Amino acid sequence: MARVVLEDLGKRYGAVWAVRDLHLAVDDGEFVSLLGPSGCGKTTTLRMVAGFVRPSHGRIAVGDEVLSTPTWHVPPERRGMAMVFQSYAVWPHMTVFQNVAYPLRCARVGPAELQARTRRALELVRMHQLADRYPHELSGGQQQRVALARALVAEPSVLLLDEPLSNLDARLREEMREEVAELQRRLGFTVLYVTHDQAEAMALSDRVAVMRDGRLEQVGTPQEVYESPASPFVAGFVGTASFLEGEAVAWREASVEVAFPGGARLCLPCPGPVEGPVVVCVRPEWLAPDPRGPLRGRVVRRAYMGDRVDCTLEGPGGRLLWRTSVPGAPALGEEVAFRVLRSAVYPRTAATTSDGSVAT
């Protein structure tokens, strides 16, 4: 059972908390991504799980075994885990085969089993035909496959990946993303994956844990995080979102009436009561043109994207991004009437900036 449990996990460097009050459980066979901007604590969290960093407080356990507390620490090599690094970390003086076989040599696995398991790992990542090459003879994607095979050959209970695709170009990154997902489905290992790329997190994960300033901001399925963001920060970081400022004037039965500058009013879904200044999050696909729509905006920017046109509308309370099909797309300067199909409404505090992010 490779269920990873992080309880009240924290790491402090001097007076600065890199990770604080983190609670997360990753079920056996689950793929969970830690998603957030640089400096949010996601890599520190991963390194604590790997055993490279000791927590300042809290507890890390896999199954029934406690791996880390402030006073107890199981070293990395005894955790039954494997890690793939952003830099690949393949040894330049070893061939592909020797790189992948190295964990088995360290574990003193017999020659026949070493050969068989190494070949099998290389076949999984489609590198068996390049087994005799050296890293300098490989592309970046091939080196990443070697690093992945080296992690898989040890048959870990938990696989840790620290931004493993960030050094690849866009097309290769998509190919490797599909390969990682397919391997995880076939082999069923537990994965904790660190990334700042929202597309990676959404495409790969059973659940996404969004981090900010060392804390978890929201944990949920990709659909939950995208469609029901818990905060303006999550709404702005995961996917594309626009933010309108308004005033909540009435709340009734899970909806709120919001007044916008210029007199426009909308009744929007809202699970809890809010009053006073609010920020309304609207994603591009949550807007629909409607000649009788309650809101109007002027096209102040128009970008042709091939399969669509991205229009920035100057609307009541702020600017909105709207994506529309190429035929019939409005011209620059044209006024568009529209309605809001769905939204997310948050109290606008002093710490919430106009773009929906939260000031530090």
Image (cartoon, rainbow, N blue to C red):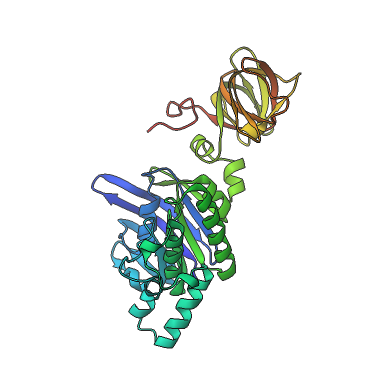
Query: Could you tell whether 251 is left or right of 11 in the image?
Result: right
Q: Quadrant of the C terminus?
A: top left
Q: Farthest residue to the right: give it.
A: 292
Which of the 4 quarters of the picture holds residue 243?
Answer: top right
Looking at the image, residue 253 sits to the left or right of residue 19; the answer is right
Q: Nearer the viewer, residue 344 or 87?
A: 87
Residue visible at 53% across and 29% down in the picture: 347
Q: Which one is nearer the viewer's eye here, 195 or 127?
A: 127
| Residue pictured at 36% horizontal, 44% vertical | 39
- Where residue 81 appears, as percent x and y from the top left, is 41, 69
Which residue is pictured at 31% across the width and 62% down the height?
52
Query: Where is residue 175, by image quadrant?
Result: bottom right
Residue at the extreme left of the image, as rendered: 14
Relative to residue 213, is residue 139 depicted above or below?
below
Q: Position of residue 71 (x, y in %)?
A: 28, 65
The answer to whether one can see residue 63 in this image is no
User: Horizontal and vertical percent for residue 330?
Assistant: 68, 21
Percent across and percent down for residue 273 are 60, 31
Q: Nearer the viewer, residue 249 or 100?
A: 100
Does 319 sit above or below residue 65?
above
Q: Say whether residue 4 is visible.
A: yes
Please name whichever residue, 207 or 255, is drawn nearer the observer in this view of the structure. Answer: 207
> Is 324 placed above or below 20 here?
above
Q: Is residue 221 left or right of residue 108?
A: right
